[in-house]
Image (cartoon, rainbow, N blue to C red):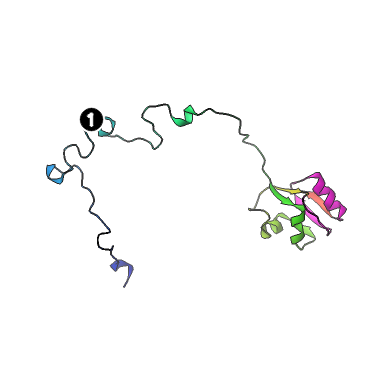
Amino acid sequence: MDLGSLKHAEGATRKTKRIGRGPGSGHGKTATRGHKGQHARSGAKHRAWFEGGQMPLQRRVPKRGFTHIFKKTFEIVNVGDLERIQAARITAEQLLEANLIPRRGARIKILGEGEIKKAVEIEAHAFSKSAEEKIQAAGGKAIRI
C-alpha cells in the first residue's frame, strides 16, 4: 500500500463536462453559454466585485472619517503584569518571553494598572504618569527607549 495506489471511492468522482464538442455531447453549439448576451461573447470574464455596470458598492457607500497613515500604535503592558518577570532590568525581549507583548519590534507603553512591589528598571517607549510614579515609588526606574 502506497500513495500511488490510492483511488477515490466508487461514485465519488464524475467525468468532467466536455463543452463545445458537437450536438452529440449535449453541450455543443452554444457550449452552455446561452444565446447572445454579455457572457456568451468571447473574452467574457468579469471581476468578482463587478456589478454589471451598476455603480459599485465601494463607490455607493459614503466615506467618513480619516485614517492617519503615520499613527503610532503601542502594545500595552500594565505595571501589575511586570511582577511576573524575575529580573532587575526588564527589556522588550523579556516582555516577549513572558507573552506580555505579541511581537518583536513593537512599541511598548507601560500603564499604571495594578501594583509593583519590587524595584526594577523598565525599558519602554512610553509610560503613563501613574505607571512612572508607581515604578519610582517602588524604587525602580522608568527608562524611555
Residue extending farthest bottom: 1
Say whether residue 100 is left or right of residue 113. Answer: left
Say whether residue 130 is left or right of residue 37. Answer: right
Closest to the observer, 73 or 111: 111
- Write down the region rendered in magenta: 113-139
| Quarter assignment of residue 24 | top left
Asked if residue 19 lies in the magenta stretch, the reply is no
Closest to the observer, 118 or 69: 118
Query: Is residue 137 shown above or below 32?
Result: below
Q: Please report the residue visible at 15 percent of the width from the left and 46 percent of the height from the top.
A: 25
Question: Where residue 116 sits in the image (x, y, percent)?
Answer: 81, 56
Q: Secondary structure at mark 1?
A: loop
Q: Please report the residue visible at 77 percent of the width from the left and 50 percent of the height from the top.
A: 113
Q: Please report the residue visible at 81 percent of the width from the left and 50 percent of the height from the top.
A: 142
Question: Where residue 136 sits in the image (x, y, percent)?
Answer: 86, 52
Q: Can residue 98 be seen at all in this image of the molecule?
A: yes
Q: Residues within 10 Å of mark 1 (few under 14, many from 20)?
A: few
Say whether residue 112 is left or right of residue 64. Answer: right
| Quarter assignment of residue 5 | bottom left
Identify the amino acid type marked 1: Lys
Query: Is residue 73 shown above or below 88?
Result: above
Say whether residue 88 is left or right of residue 38. Answer: right
| Quarter assignment of residue 12 | bottom left
For the N terminus, the image quarter is bottom left
Residue denoted by label 1? 36
Q: Can residue 145 be seen at all in this image of the molecule?
A: no
Asked if residue 121 lies in the magenta stretch, the reply is yes
